[in-house]
Image: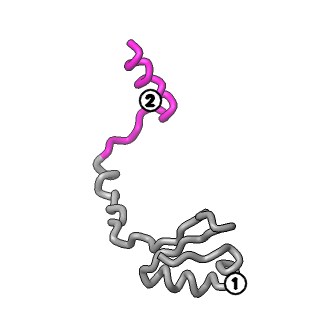
């Protein structure tokens, strides 16, 4: 992992981001103490599934959400 100080980070941010995008991790230090780490974003995360079918199967709400939450809380307390 490469280590760079804050002023170097300011001067070379675009190049550092290119390195991170290529898979490198970069440690940012201030006065020889680590303060941040630049790491690539995990792109293997799965996107949210389409929820249209689920929404069409749900019955419409007959009461406001506030009232539904309140009644659920009261049920838990009793």
Alpha-carbon span between mark 2 and mark 1: 54 Å
Instruction: Residue lying at the far front in this picture: please name it.
Output: 32
The colouring scheme, among rainbow, by chain, secondary structure or one colour, is: one colour
Left or right relative to 45: residue 73: right
Is residue 62 in the magenta section?
yes
Q: Is residue 21 above or below residue 53?
A: below
Nearest the viewer among 19 and 76 is 19
SS for callout 2: helix
Residue plotted at (38% across, 18% down): 75
Is residue 64 in the magenta section?
yes
How far from the left and from the top, in percent, is residue 62? 41, 33
Contact (Cβ within 8 Å) of mark 2 with mark 1: no
How many numbered circles are shown? 2
How far from the left and from the top, in percent, is residue 52? 34, 58
Nearest the viewer among 21 and 49 is 21
Q: Which residue range is magenta in the image?
A: 58-78
How far from the left and from the top, in percent, is residue 55? 34, 51
Q: Is residue 64 above or below residue 29?
A: above
Rendered image: mark on residue 68:
2
- Residue 78: quarter of image: top left
Residue plotted at (69% across, 84% down): 11
Nearest the viewer among 17 and 73 is 17
SS for callout 1: helix
Q: Which residue is mark 1?
A: 11
Question: Mark 2: few, some, or many residues within 10 Å (few <14, many ≥20)?
Answer: few
């Amino acid at each position: 992992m490469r280590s760079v100080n804050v002023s170097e980070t300011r001067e070379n941010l675009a190049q550092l981001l290119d390195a991170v995008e290529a898979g490198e991790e970069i440690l940012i230090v201030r006065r020889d103490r680590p303060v941040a780490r630049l790491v690539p974003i995990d792109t293997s995360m799965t996107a949210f599934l389409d929820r249209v079918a689920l929404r069409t199967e749900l019955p419409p709400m007959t009461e406001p959400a506030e009232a539904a939450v309140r009644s659920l809380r009261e049920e838990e307390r009793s």
